[in-house]
Image (cartoon, helix red, strand yellow):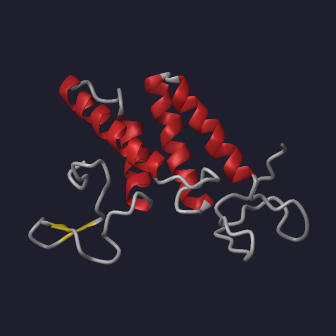
């Protein structure tokens, strides 16, 4: 949460002195990887620790991150047009929903799940894997191997 900016997005790296590196090309905020991974981690921590004040901070941080991530979904409900980073957001949202029980969160879980499934390869030697998100070019990260029936 120390890497989270006031707008809810995240930086990724720090300098040796502990100051946040806001300018490194792989540390800049982008409503993508850093935010999705942080949201997933923070959502997993909600209601885990007995410290009520910490839990309130976790909830506030997760809400802000969720807002950033939702704003960065494209028209296909993919984050940065990728199924890989969308899956990280989805994992965080599932954990967050365990806390929130908010119907809108459940709606997003369904939308993101359907968006990812659209990119599953159904035929050929890669049947069952998920394309990265670019229908014109096959990009595979090998992050899921199980065939999903839909």
| x then y, percent, for residue 109 | 59, 37
> Relative to residue 132, is residue 7 drawn left or right?
left
Quarter holding residue 45: top left
Q: Residue at x 68, y 69 (%)?
A: 134
Q: Residue at x 31, y 70 (%)?
A: 27
| x then y, percent, for residue 55 | 27, 29
Does residue 58 lie above or below 128 as drawn?
above
Task: Decide which of 4, 124 is in the foreground and name it.
Answer: 4
Quarter holding residue 145: bottom right
> Relative to residue 113, is residue 97 drawn left or right?
left
Q: Residue at x 49, y 35 (%)?
A: 95
Does residue 111 lie above or below 127 as drawn?
above
Q: Residue furthest left?
A: 17
Q: Residue furthest right?
A: 124
> Relative to residue 117, is residue 94 drawn left or right?
left
Q: Residue at x 49, y 26 (%)?
A: 98
Q: How many marks?
A: 0
Does residue 10 lie above or below 97 as drawn?
below
Task: Decide which of 82, 1 is in the foreground and name it.
Answer: 82
- The quadrant of the rendering that contains the C terminus is top right
| x then y, percent, for residue 11 | 28, 62
Task: Decide which of 42, 6 is in the foreground and name it.
Answer: 6
> Relative to residue 36, is residue 55 drawn left or right?
left
| x then y, percent, for residue 51 | 21, 26
């Amino acid at each position: 949460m120390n890497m989270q900016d006031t707008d809810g997005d995240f930086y990724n790296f720090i300098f040796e002195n502990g100051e946040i590196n806001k300018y490194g090309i792989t540390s800049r905020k982008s409503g993508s990887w850093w935010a999705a991974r942080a949201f997933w981690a923070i959502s997993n921590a909600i209601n885990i620790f007995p410290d009520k004040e910490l839990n309130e901070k976790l909830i506030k941080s997760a809400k802000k991150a969720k807002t950033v991530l939702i704003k960065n979904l494209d028209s296909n409900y993919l984050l940065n047009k990728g199924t890989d980073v969308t899956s990280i957001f989805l994992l965080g949202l599932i954990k967050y929903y365990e806390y929130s029980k908010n119907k809108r969160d459940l709606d997003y879980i369904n939308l993101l799940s359907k968006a990812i499934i659209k990119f599953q390869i159904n035929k050929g030697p890669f049947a069952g894997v998920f394309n990265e998100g670019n229908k014109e070019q096959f990009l595979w990260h090998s992050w899921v191997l199980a065939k999903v029936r839909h």
